[in-house]
Amino acid sequence: MNGAWNDFVLIDNRDGAVTLSREQIAKLCHRQRGVGADGLILLKNAEGEGDWAWDFYNADGSDAEMCGNGARCFASYIQHTLGGDGTLSFETACGLIRAEIGDTTVTVNLTNPHSLALNETISTTDGEKTVHSLNTGVPHAVLMVDDADAAMVASLGEEIRHHDHFAPAGTNVNFVQNLAPGKIRVRTYERGVGETLACGTGVCASAILAAQLNDWPANVQVTVLGGDTLQVAFENDGDNFSNVQLTGPAQFVFEGTMAV
């Protein structure tokens, strides 16, 4: 499946029969030797208050707490596989996610963001950079740029992802261009993946921070590298954010089997 060109392998593991090593996950996600994906998601039975649960892995096989585009795809996958009334919840490492599946889009309510930090300065090989940070399920750093297309996403993104300022866990890195009031363009370098065509949690972090920095209303349109535009709505009380909603497409690409 893909959500705004952020693509995923999804596997029904309700019976618990699927056990994959980090190397096997990386093979499945490899674009030349496997299916090819930005991440892999296992559907599991819930252990708490959710309807279902997931295990989510980055393309290199590492664990990830959350993924906004993956959450939309996962919700649509559950509806496609098991049916339902279009609303559901599922348990993740960062908390309970609620989803509403529409005709052409899926909306997910993310867990409340935290760890806001504005206007911090870090040293890079490209000079001093001002970064803003927010955790929207996973940590994100945001750099405001004049032209997202000209941003050094691969080199600077990798450097900041591993920067001592964000040690030990590191961070995802977003390069954000203001297009108009309430509209931004984002490119994201993700931990465990590299640059992706979209990143849901990065879209949310970028939208919230752009609104905060520019005093915009809490409803932002975000255009991603793949060309799709996602909608981010939220509530805030000063520096406290809640009811974050991410709306965008979730599309099936194909079903199949692969030997690992």
Image (cartoon, rainbow, N blue to C red):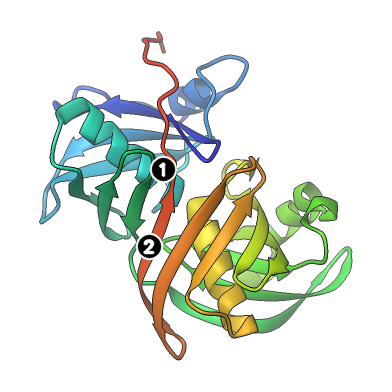
Where disc 1 sits, the SS reads: helix
Q: Residue at x 53, y 67 (%)?
A: 220
- In the rendered image, residue 209, in percent from the top left (x then y), is placed at 58, 75
Q: Is residue 223 left or right of residue 10?
A: right
- In the rendered image, residue 193, in percent from the top left (x then y), is placed at 59, 41
Q: Is residue 64 left or right of residue 60?
A: left
Residue linked to disc 1: 70
Q: Quadrant of residue 125?
A: bottom right
Q: Amino acid at mark 1?
A: Gly
Q: Residue at x 53, y 16 (%)?
A: 34
Asked whether the viewer can see residue 178, the reply is yes
Q: Residue at x 81, y 55 (%)?
A: 151
* Outermost residue, right side: 126
Does residue 68 lie above or below 103 as drawn? below
Q: Amino acid at mark 2?
A: Gln
Q: Quick one: label 2 or label 1, which is nearer the N terminus? A: 1
**What crowding class fits label 2: few (fewer than 14 Cα within 10 Å), some (14-19), or many (20 or more)?**
many
Q: Quadrant of the N terminus?
A: top left
- In the rendered image, residue 252, in percent from the top left (x then y), is placed at 40, 26
Q: Is residue 159 left or right of residue 223?
A: right
Q: Measure the C-alpha gap from mark 2 to mark 1.
A: 14 Å
Q: Quadrant of the C terminus?
A: top left
Q: Residue at x 64, y 82 (%)?
A: 214
Q: Is residue 146 left or right of residue 100?
A: right
Residue linked to disc 2: 245
Does residue 102 lie above or below 203 as drawn? above
Does residue 170 lie above or below 192 as drawn? below
- In the rendered image, residue 129, in percent from the top left (x then y), is placed at 80, 73
Where disc 2 sits, the SS reads: strand
Instruction: Choose between 215 and 48: the one closer to the eye.
Output: 215
**What crowding class fits label 1: few (fewer than 14 Cα within 10 Å), some (14-19), or many (20 or more)?**
many
